[in-house]
Image (cartoon, helix red, strand yellow):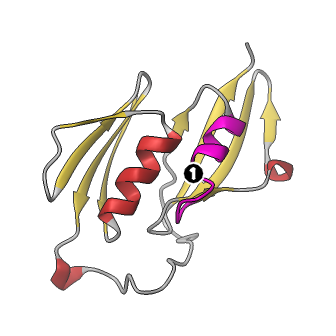
Amino acid sequence: MTTVVLWADRFDECRDFYQAILDATLEHESETFVDIRSANNAVLLHRVPEEWASDTSKPAEPREENPIKPVFEVDNIEDARASVSSSAGQLFDPSTQQTYGAMTYCDGVDPDGNVIQVFETAK
C-alpha cells in the first residue's frame, strides 16, 4: 500500500481530487485533516495554515522540480482520468502514457501542482 502525507493549500480541492482519482473513502475527517483511503493507497492530507498558504486565487503551477513524485495504483487509468476531469487537478493526455511490462503509467498534477503518477496493471 502506498501512503503519502501531503500538506495542501487547496485543501478541499485536493481532498476531492484524491478521493475521486483513487476511488477512495474519507476517514477521520476534520477541518484541517483527512485520511483518504482506498484498497491500495492512502493520502493523509493536512490543511496548510492560512498564514503559510500559497496564493490560491490562481491555478497552481506544476511543481516539476519537487524531489518526490507519489505513485498510486488505480484499477483503470482512463476511469481515473475521467473522475477528475472537472477538477483543478488532472491526469495528462493518454498519449503521454507509457507501458513497461505489465504496467501502464500516467503522470498528472493535483490541485496544488504536485506532480503525481498513477499506474494500472494488465489484467
- Residue type at numbered disc 1: Val
Instruction: Look at the image and say whether residue 88 sits in the magenta stretch.
Output: yes
Which residue sits furthest front? 86
Above or below, 86 against 49 in this view is above
Quarter of the image for residue 92 reads bottom right
Q: Please tell me which residue lies in front, 75 or 68.
A: 75
Residue visible at 21% across and 81% down in the picture = 52
Residue visible at 14% across and 58% down in the picture = 31
Q: In the image, 16: left or right of 53?
A: right
Question: Residue 87: horizontal and vertical position, in percent?
Answer: 53, 60
Looking at the rendering, in which quadrant would you find the C terminus? top right
Tally the marks.
Answer: 1
Question: Residue 30: horizontal and vertical position, in percent?
Answer: 13, 51
Label 1 residue SS: loop
Instruction: Give the residue at mark 1.
Output: 84
Residue visible at 40% across and 33% down in the picture = 24
Quarter of the image for residue 99 reads top right
Looking at the rendering, in which quadrant would you find the N terminus? top left
Quarter of the image for residue 61 reads bottom right
Residues packed near mark 1 inside 10 Å, few (<14), some (14 to 19) or many (20 plus)? many
Q: Please tell me which residue lies in front, 69 or 46.
A: 46
Residue visible at 66% across and 52% down in the picture = 107
Span of residues in magenta: 77-89
Above or below, 100 against 30 in this view is above
Q: Please tell me which residue lies in front, 83 or 47.
A: 83
Q: In the image, 30: left or right of 9?
A: left
Instruction: Look at the image and say whether residue 52 sits in the magenta stretch.
Output: no
Q: In the image, 14: left or right of 89?
A: left
Above or below, 44 against 79 in this view is below
Question: Residue 19: horizontal and vertical position, in percent?
Answer: 41, 42
